[in-house]
Structures are given as structure tokens and as C-alpha cells.
Image (spheres, rainbow, N blue to C red):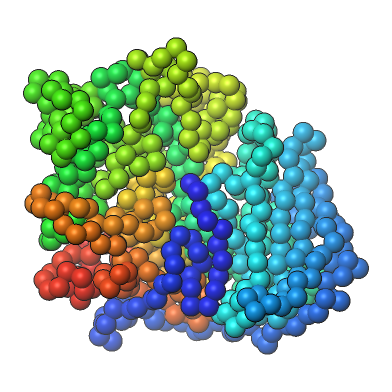
Amino acid sequence: MNFPIPTIQKGRPIAVFILICVTLRLGLSAAAVAAEGISAPGTKLPPATSDRVITAADVAVERVGTSIPATAMGEPVGGVSLSPPRWIEATTNSVAHAVVDGSIAPKDPKGYPIKFRVLLPVRWSRRAIQVGGAGINGFVPMFRGERPGSATAGFARYGSDSGHQMGQGDEWALNEEAIRNLGYMQMKKTHDAAMVIMERVYGERPRFNYYIGGSQGGREGLTVAQRYPADYDGIVADVPIVNFSSLMLAPELIRIQEKPLSNWVTRAKANAIRAEFMRQADKLDGLADGVINSYMAARARFDLSQGDPQRNPWAALRAPDGTDPNPSDTSVNARLTDGQIATLKFVYSRYRFATPLANGVRSFGMWVPNTDPAGSGLIADRRFRGQEGAGENAPMHSHLGVLGVTGFLMQNLSANPLDYVEGGLLNKRREQLSEWLDSTNPDLTAFYKRGGKLIVTIGTDDTLASPGAQLDYFQSVLDKMGREQVDAFARFYVIPQAGHGLSGRSAGTNGDGQNMSQFSIPNRFDRTSLITAWVEQNEAPGRTLVVTAGGRSLPLCSYPNYPRYKGGPPESAASYESAGP
């Protein structure tokens, strides 16, 4: 769930993990343009009026103030205090701007404050961006001023640490207000405080307000669309950790599945697993090139929650009599025990909950076929306390989100996370945490009716977030609102074989078992420009775009479509068509 701090620069998207991006639209006929939604009908929104210009005198303490009344906040707070504003003069790399830091006190006397920051440019275009967090948060985004001449140099920006501070211990994970702040309240509190500050300095609130983030910040973007739809005009949510409460638990579920030593999938099997994914799924898009473009069909082959549950998609790798003849074999010909196959079925199938969680969600999507089966702890290199074969001094299993298991869920920071039992005594707590943390509400009607626009982008090789959960959320929105309504305000882009940073590479061996030169997955497009044009000019991005990388181009399709090869140079987007699963 790690996510870099975003910056916005001219000709560049928010630095959510990708570098210089160029948006290229497909060459379509006029009729196709209308069908693709590239230029949506409707009256354009009135543009923001001329820029407001401020000086250092406009951000003096006397004007900014030292506090904000609790009555100005849309969620309960114990108070809001402001530090003296700082004025930063222009440099060759940054426009002049003011910085206002603040602290939002909790209602709970034993709670934790929310630290936040607002950047106010000298020349304000009456626009603002709330920047999402990263990982499990705990730090204020370290903004700097925009470059002179940048398309977004006139945007005010703001963000927070979400209500706890890194390096000050884990006890905050036992405080319910701190958990709810992380889940949803900090977004509203930070927003409301920033709006007051902008109004005091500029004399008005922004004409257009955006939320942009990835990973944790992507979940936050979905959360504000679901919970606070009146506050935002446009949202960019990259690789969102949609089912946050279950994502934190999922690595433990895998290690629990591997408690028997016979179920342990070792790193030695990674090459064989990858090769089997390629053998079965690479050519589903019409081309053996080391890229699984047809992600829905690939998922259906390995997800035993759909189709015949008795089938065995791993039968070709099964060792004779289910016993591995060579556990140290790291080749593509390595064989799997019956226990290892059971674990792989578990990892790549939807995980069903004992009872429905928030918004009626009954399962967690887990992972889909990918080129990095050992990534982010999907394969463990050692045994952990509570697993068969673990040494007397074996460590507890740990990962980025484990605090959500021992702290949020078990409410015991010393607990062994592998002691979790689905449907046991913690089930009610699971349901409660899901209500606080998960951004799974498929009903975005209020955001849509207000005119809000949403762009979500995921990668199917993501081993930090769960592509399965993301895909299931996309489907739930379509089921709830219908294709026509969703296309009017949202794009759910899927980059096949891209990871948590939305970058990726082809496999070194294709579906025919042939070795291939690897290439970068095309992924470059400017979401910031797309969302602002959609919000402010009613210029809807296509349901299919063209993305580029390393001299290659490929159609970028909105869920559930994928790029299907139709013939021609494999490195050219013109050789593909957007196809349904």
C-alpha cells in the first residue's frame, strides 16, 4: 500500500507512480467518437473567473486566524488550531505560495490529532486539490510549490496525516476515533478546515475542487465520492485499496491456509506458477506475447468461486501422487503437492466471508493471474509462529497492514495474527471495521447527480492491492447504476499486467513456452488533464484511450473490456480492438 507523495507539474499527471504521460485518443470516426463518449453532450460548465492574486500581507495571522470553530466542521472535532502561516518566495522551480499548517483535535480526550497542511499559491485559479495519503498514512504530504507556468500552478492543495503520526508508536490503532478518522472522517475534517482557510485568504471557496490519490489515497477518493459527494467535482483514484479491512487481513488468511507444512508454497515454485498462468491465459487475447490482456477470462480459469468448483486449474503442475519429487526445483517444470495446489486455489479464488460486510459485500476478490506470484508476500520465504514446522523462536507474521489485524481487529498489539478464525468471536468487530474502512458502496448516485466525475485506474499485476476486489467493485457499480449512467460520469480503466505503480513488464516466456525479450507495458496517460477537462469543459474521456511506453502503444479499456489482438504489428495500438470478456 505504499504510495509516493503526488506532485503536479505541467504536462505531467499526478505522480502516482508514473512519469511523463501523454494522452492519445484513438483515431475514431465521428460516429465512433460519440459512441466512445469522448465528447459527451451537455452544456459546458462556466469557467473559473480571473485569478485571485495575494501577497504575503494577505496571509498574516490577523487574516488567517489561529483557530477554526468546531461548528464549521462537518464531522465532530475537539477544536482546530492553526500555526502561524509561512510565506515562501518564488524560485526558478516554484511559484510563490503560503503554507498553513493546522491540527484538528479529537473529541476523545485519549484520541489523536489530525495534522494537516494547506498550500495557497500567489496566483489562485479558484481551483483546489485534496491530495490522498499512502500506506497506512501517518504523515502530512510534504507539498512544495508548483513550477512557474505549470497548468496547475494556480491550484491550492491540501492534505493530512489522517489522524495519527508515524514514529509515535502503534497504540493509536486501539483508539476507535483514530480508526474512524483513517477510514473516512479525516477526509471531511481536512476538507472543511481547508475551505475555511481558503475563504479567509482569498475571500471565497474554490470554484472546482478535486480529490487525487492512489492506493490508500485511491480508497480515500472512492470514500469521499460515496460519503461526501457534495464536496468534490472530480476524483482520480489510482489502484484503490477498496476493501481495506479485508486487504489488511488477506496476507494472514494466506499464512493461515499454509499452517500445515504441506500447504506451504515456496518461492522455488514461482517460475512454474508464472509459466502456468501464461500457458493458460496469454493467448486468450489472440496473441502469445507474454501479456495477459484478457484479464476477466484469465481470472475465470483460476477462480474456483465461479464455474465448476471441482475442476483443478493446476492439474498440469500436480506432482505424481501429490508428492513433490524435487522441492528445490526452481524451473518452469517444478511440480506442486496437493497441499500447495489447495493454497493456490485459495489465493486466486474469491474468499467468502462468514457474514456479509459493509454494503452487503459477501466476499473478497483476492488476486488474479499475474507475472509476480511471489510479490508482496503472496509467497513466504519462511515459517511463522503458529505454523507447522516453525521454530521455537519463529517471528510473528508481519506486513504493512498487520496493524489492522492485531490493533483494529484483535485489539491486542501483541496478538498472533495467525490466530484469527473466520466467523469466530471477532466477526462482529469485522462487520464494524468494514463499515468504517471499506469504500465498497456501489451507489454513487448522489455524486453523479451533482455532476461529479470519477476516473479509477488499476493494474491486474498488483500484488499490494487486490485486483480481484477492485474488479468486483467495478462490477457492483455497474450492477447498481447501469452501464449508461456509469459511462456518463465514471471511467474504470484497467491496465493488464501493471502493478501497484501502474507499470509492468511482459513475461520472459510466452504462452507457447517460448523465451521472449521483455518490454514495458504501455501505461502513460494524463489523468489530471482528463479529469479537469471532463469537469470543467464537459469533455468526457473515451471509454478507450491509447497509452504508450517505450515505443509501444496499446488501447486502454474501461472495465470489463480488454485489448484484443486483431492482426498487425504487436507494438501498435492499431493492431488491437477493445473487446468484451
**Residue 286: quadrant of the picture:** bottom left
Which residue appears at 48% of the width and 73% of the height?
A: 12
Q: Is residue 342 above or below residue 289?
A: above
Q: Is residue 535 above or below residue 354?
A: below
In this view of the protein, which residue sits in the foreground, 459 or 300? 459
In the figure, is residue 137 to the left or right of 318? right
Whole-percent x, y for residue 399 in the image:
48, 35
Which residue appears at 8% of the width and 23% of the height?
A: 320
* Whether residue 127 is visible: no
Q: Quadrant of the C terminus?
A: bottom left
Whole-percent x, y for residue 389 in the image:
34, 15
Seen as rendered, the residue at the extreme top is 392
In this view of the protein, which residue sits in the foreground, 355 or 494? 494
Whole-percent x, y for residue 230 in the image:
61, 63
In the figure, is residue 65 to the left or right of 75? right
In the figure, is residue 436 to the left or right of 266? right
Seen as rendered, the residue at the extreme right is 62
